[in-house]
Image (tube, rainbow, N blue to C red):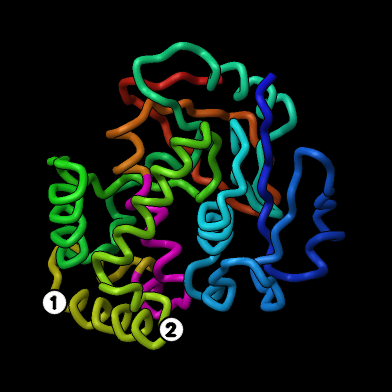
Amino acid sequence: MNIYKIWRSYYQKEQYNDFNILTNNNVIPFYTNDLSNNQININYLNEYLGELVMLYYIWKNNLKSDIIFIDQYSKRFYQNAYEDGIKLLNCNTNKNSVIVTWPYFDLELNHQWITNDIIVKYKTFLKQTYNMELEFPYNKFWWIMFGCKWETFCDICQFIFGFLDYLFPNESWTNINNLIDFRDNQYELSKTDNTINKDHYDMHFYKDKRFFAFLFEQLLPVYVSNKFNIIVSNNYNIKIKYCYEQNMNMNNLIIT
């Protein structure tokens, strides 16, 4: 029988009770602002990297489970989605699979806010590291909320933190000031980048502390959907007031 773990991030202590985050053999809450954690962690970067600090913690400390689910205090799959996901992830497929949530996988083009500078860096990184050549679609986005086998999870983490190492050599991305300088530089570049919709609200991302978390919400789907089989689940619970509902017309999808 496969061992599975659900890692659930929250960034305010009161969210543990407010959102009924339970701790049991399968659910592991992770307080992303915990600066007293004595294992390898980058929790001090939570304001800038968001829930990515939890992925880093799991990966770097090799907290292995056969199957791993990543979700958040207010965004999670329903219980039967975990159970169905385990069955699907154990199926024999040509490629490993990644379960993602339905509504945030495809957005309208006018939500594009990444500068051409980042896209060029991203494509170069994919080519040099993975020998991947692909067009960057502006309409790929999902929250960092997914399920997969451990080996696939490690691949995803290697991509995330490998790209940060590419942007900031020698792990200089762990210095908050370097993240801020890069973000501010992208904001200046966006003013002259004709691919950016200057009138769209997405421009505020360039001044948001979570710039890099938002960035990977667009970069991850491009990488993951080109390397792995995508299982799109509409079996989720999102406790927020809005939700983008988009029709999907993509190949290689399994809808649960």
**Residue 8 placed where, x, y %?**
68, 51
Work out whether mark 1 precedes mark 2 in sequence or the reverse, and give the earlier one.
Answer: 2
Where 116 falls versus 4 (above or below)?
below
Res. 111 image quadrant: bottom left
Q: Give the residue drawn at x 54%, y 64%.
A: 53
Residue 69 position, x and y percent, is 61, 39
Q: Which residues are magenta?
A: 203-220
Which element is circle 1 on?
A: loop
* Viewer-nearest residue: 70 or 171: 171
User: In this rendering, which labeled residue sits more in front, label 1 or label 2?
Assistant: 2
Quadrant in the rendering for residue 105: top left
The dot on residue 25 is none
Q: Which mark is residue 192?
A: 1
Residue type at numbered disc 1: Thr
Quadrant of the image for the N terminus?
top right
Across and down, in percent, residue 191 comes to 19, 78
Q: Examine the residues drawn in magenta and state their main secondary structure.
A: helix
Tell me which amino acid carries mark 2.
Answer: Ile
Disc 2 target residue:
176
Neighbourhood count class around disc 1 (C-alpha, 10 Å): few under 14, some 14–19, many 20 upward: few
Does the stretch in magenta take in 198? no
* Residue at left offset 41%, top offset 30%: 247
Residue 19 as seen in the image, left or right of residue 175:
right
Residue 34 figure quarter? bottom right
